Image (cartoon, rainbow, N blue to C red):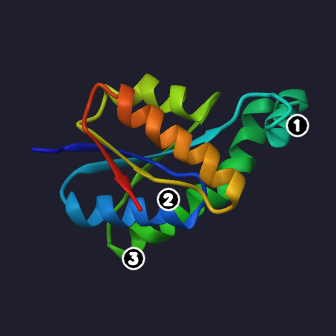
Amino acid sequence: MVSRVLVAMDGSEVAEQALRYALEVHPTAEITVLTVVGEPSAMFGEATAIALSDDPEESMREYAEPVVTRAQEIADEYGVEVRTEVGTGHPARTILDVADEFDTVVLGSHGGTLADRLFVGNVAEKVFRRSPVPVTVVR
């Protein structure tokens, strides 16, 4: 029986579908939505801004706020409360670091833009291959 579900969300439509899937398939489970803010690099402009801010924790929450808010709106549609967490670092690594605390992981197959599809698709593949718990990839 699945009692704890981790849903990784990045603000894409397919990530929203992943949350809806988790809410429908695991209606009695405790669902945690994890949003990961990337580590500083040339590819992650927002992460660099976070690292250089006066209060990185607050900046991290600000960047994640739209995703967290949307996750709560979707959960409200189902009449369910979800926990939300904001992580930092490489998304796949961050998801895998906490995956063993859950019975299953649910995530979208790709993000919205071409770059997101390539990057998030890569994240989904890494999580799928390396997770210590079952993974559902939603398209």
Quarter of the image where the N terminus is located: top left
Quarter of the image where the C terminus is located: bottom left
Q: At 27% from the left edge and 48% from the top edge, which residue is drawn?
A: 30
Which label was assigned to residue 78? Answer: none
Q: Is residue 39 above or below residue 70?
A: above
Label 1 residue SS: helix
Label 1 to label 2: alpha-carbon separation: 24 Å
Label 3 residue SS: helix
Q: Quadrant of residue 43?
A: top right
Q: How many marks?
A: 3
Tell me residue 102's x, y (percent).
Answer: 29, 34
Q: At 41% from the left edge and 71% from the top edge, which residue is drawn?
A: 76
Query: Which residue is at the front of the view, 123 or 20?
Result: 123
Tell me residue 103's x, y (percent).
Answer: 23, 36
| Residue type pointed to by label 2 | Ala
Tell me residue 31's x, y (percent).
Answer: 33, 50
Label 2 residue SS: helix
Which label was assigned to residue 15? Answer: 2
Label 3 to label 2: alpha-carbon separation: 16 Å
List the residue tagged with mark 3.
77
Q: Residues within 10 Å of mark 2 (few under 14, many from 20)?
A: many
Disc with the residue nearer the chain's start (3 vs 2):
2
